Image: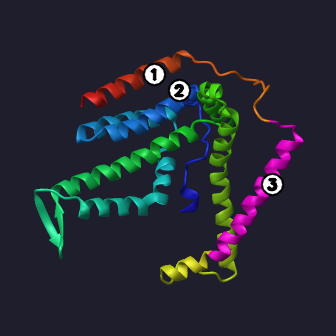
Amino acid sequence: MIRDITIGQYYPANSYIHELDPRMKLLGTLTFIISLFIANNVWGYIVAFVYLGTVIIISKVPLKFMLKGLKAIFIIIILTVILNLFFTPGEEKLFNIGSVVVYKEGLYFAALMAIRLIFLIIGSSILTLTTSPIQLTDGIEYSLNPLKKIKVPAHEIAMMMTIALRFIPILLEETDKIMKAQMARGADFESGGIVKRAKSLIPLLVPLFISAFRRADDLALAMEARCYRGGEGRTRMKQLKYTKYDLVALIVLVVYITILIIL
């Protein structure tokens, strides 16, 4: 399950989505996330499904690779469905389990929340899967440039966000290695109750934290050895430029959000 988390990973491919300006992809991802909270009926989610499916096909990223990311949040999805199913009041009663009554509105809202979570994870994964770390850093920094007028360190914020995203798959891989090493020494992470499982994670968390701090220290030394002093006065070999594909993507995004608001 650890290897199934796709957020933070980059999948190289030759597609129009990969060629888009990172600022356009950031805007598209943010707009899509907002649109999921705008949609409040079945037709809205059908439009979101068509839009997301079209983007996935154009990106040429295998659907199986994206669906792997849902395994890591399966428990969260189930918990969300249960909470909305049993604790949403309504008028039309379906059935009851003991003193808990399940209404038609609760079933409807639970289904919508599950779909919203699935779309949210897949939509967010597309951004990192189709954008290299350097492009993502540049895109975030360019998007935050207007905030420099009020002394907001745009470059440093962009760098920290990108490093955090890129550390996700690295730490997951490290966790997988430590877990296998501990299991080879007789550690058991699956049997027993919740308390026992929590205690069994201590041999996993301690070396993981030590490894994370060591990697952070190595990264800081590497940046210092290359005379990194922040974003002031830095230039870029490749400047971000909008192309005709970005214009087409913007038009499609406007049409999508307009249809969603109308519905």
Q: Quadrant for the C terminus, please.
A: top left
Image position of 198 with respect to 11: above or below: below
Look at 72% across and 69% down and name the residue there: 207
Helix, strand or loop for disc 3: helix
Give whichever of 49, 120 is nearer the camera. Answer: 120
Q: Provide the residue designation for mark 3.
A: 217
Look at 28% across and 59% down and name the residue there: 84
Question: Relative to 236, is 47 on the left or the right?
Answer: left
Cβ–Cβ under 8 Å for marks 1 and 3: no
**Amino acid type of the residue tagged 3 in the rendering:** Asp
**Amino acid type of the residue tagged 1 in the rendering:** Leu
Residue 184 is situated, as x and y percent measured from the top left of the image, at 68, 78
Q: Earlier in the sequence, mark 1 or mark 3?
A: 3
Instruction: Note whether residue 131 is visible.
Output: yes
Q: Is 255 contained in the magenta span? A: no
Q: Provide the residue designation for mark 2.
A: 24
Instruction: Note whether residue 189 is visible.
Output: no
Q: Provide the residue designation for mark 1.
A: 250
Helix, strand or loop for disc 2: helix
**Amino acid type of the residue tagged 2 in the rendering:** Met
Quadrant position of residue 198: bottom right
In this view, the mark in front (1 or 3): 3
Cβ–Cβ under 8 Å for marks 1 and 2: yes
Look at 15% across and 56% down and name the residue there: 90
Q: Earlier in the sequence, mark 3 or mark 2?
A: 2
Q: CA distance from mark 1 to mark 3?
A: 41 Å
Crowding at mark 1 (Cα within 10 Å: few <14, some 14-19, many 20+): some
Residue 19 is situated, as x and y percent measured from the top left of the image, at 58, 26
Magenta stretch in the rendered image: 202-229
Image position of 49 with respect to 115: above or below: above
